[in-house]
Amino acid sequence: WIEKYRPQQIDQIVSHERVKKQIQSFMNQNALPNLLFHGPAGVGKTTLAKSVARQIFGDSFQQFIIEINASDENGIDVVRDKINNFVKSKQLFQSSNSMKLIILDECDQMSQVAQGALRRIIELSSSQARFILICNYVSKVIPPLQSRCAVFRFKPIQADYSIEMLQRIALQESLKIQKSQLKIIFDICQGDLRQCINLMECVAMSSQQVDDKLIYDISGKPHQETAVQFIQPMIFQDRNEMLQGILQQGTSLEDFCSCLLEVVLKEMGFDEAKKCFLVKRMAEIEEAMALGADIRTQMAGLVAAFSE
């Protein structure tokens, strides 16, 4: 469903009104600069880049653009060879003054040497090509590269926009799903609309009878009710067995900590000191897991934190 329902025109993209208005203004004046889109995953950065290409070149835009994912090809060779050769090449039936467009996704994964080489190519090809650089973390893009682009920040898509989009897709696919269940999908995916659509498609493929449990089961994410039960008073052994059962169902310890965090922050039965202690312990556990610590030790630490 991702490609099936990907917006084709700029005005079809949900949210990002200021960004769309500015990009459209550039295009109306035939003065499109190099662009740098940054923001979280699944908010429409690549979709907007492709919509710009389609509006410039029409339905045959594929022959005038090249898409590169820098996470797969992050070395200087791709800059020297692939990008440079494309900029210099002549396309059949292309007029001498036709521009080319290079869409470079995840450019924050490129080495600084490769980014430096890219900066030079952007300078030398200003009359032949335009670049749209896309990344999650603009801080990882070298300042000289940023300064040669118009920089646009993409904020997370608001729940209302995302749910409206999901409702339209569900209607087209004859999927009976409640708005509250779409909100669950949105919360599980943390605002990543692409992931929301993927999850809803998986749910639809599993059953036409959608319920909350099915959504959580398919996503592999823990239900908040499980986290609420986990924080209730109980002895260490019972809490430890409960955590083992949760993880055996396919939930990762990191995901369960994230779910626990939301519950702890809302829990009225904990005073501020208790909340601060638990949040700090969960942060330490997540950090340890990211660094490759033994999961059994971290499980015991989590159980102990809530048993004090």
Image (cartoon, rainbow, N blue to C red):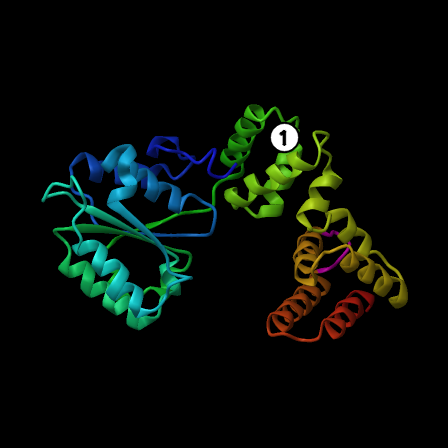
- Give the image location of residue 29, x and y in percent: 16, 36
Res. 62 visible in picture: yes
Q: Is residue 173 left or right of residue 64?
A: right
Q: Amino acid at mark 1?
A: Lys
Quadrant of residue 77 within the rendered picture: bottom left
Q: Decide if residue 42 is on the left or right side of residue 202.
A: left
Q: Main secondary structure of the magenta part?
A: loop
Tell me the magenta residue range. Answer: 267-271
Residue 155 in the image: state x and y as whole percent.
43, 47
Instruction: Read off the residue under disc 1.
Output: 179
Q: Locate residue 175, reporting x and y percent.
A: 63, 27
Q: Is residue 4 left or right of residue 227?
A: left
Residue lying at 80% horizontally and 61% vertically, measured from the top left: 243
When asked about the image quadrant of residue 237, the answer is bottom right
Front in this rendered view, residue 110 or 297: 110
* Neighbourhood count class around disc 1 (C-alpha, 10 Å): few under 14, some 14–19, many 20 upward: few
Q: From this viewpoint, which residue is outermost toward the left?
A: 96
78 or 41, nearer to the observer: 78
Q: Is residue 14 above or below residue 96?
A: above
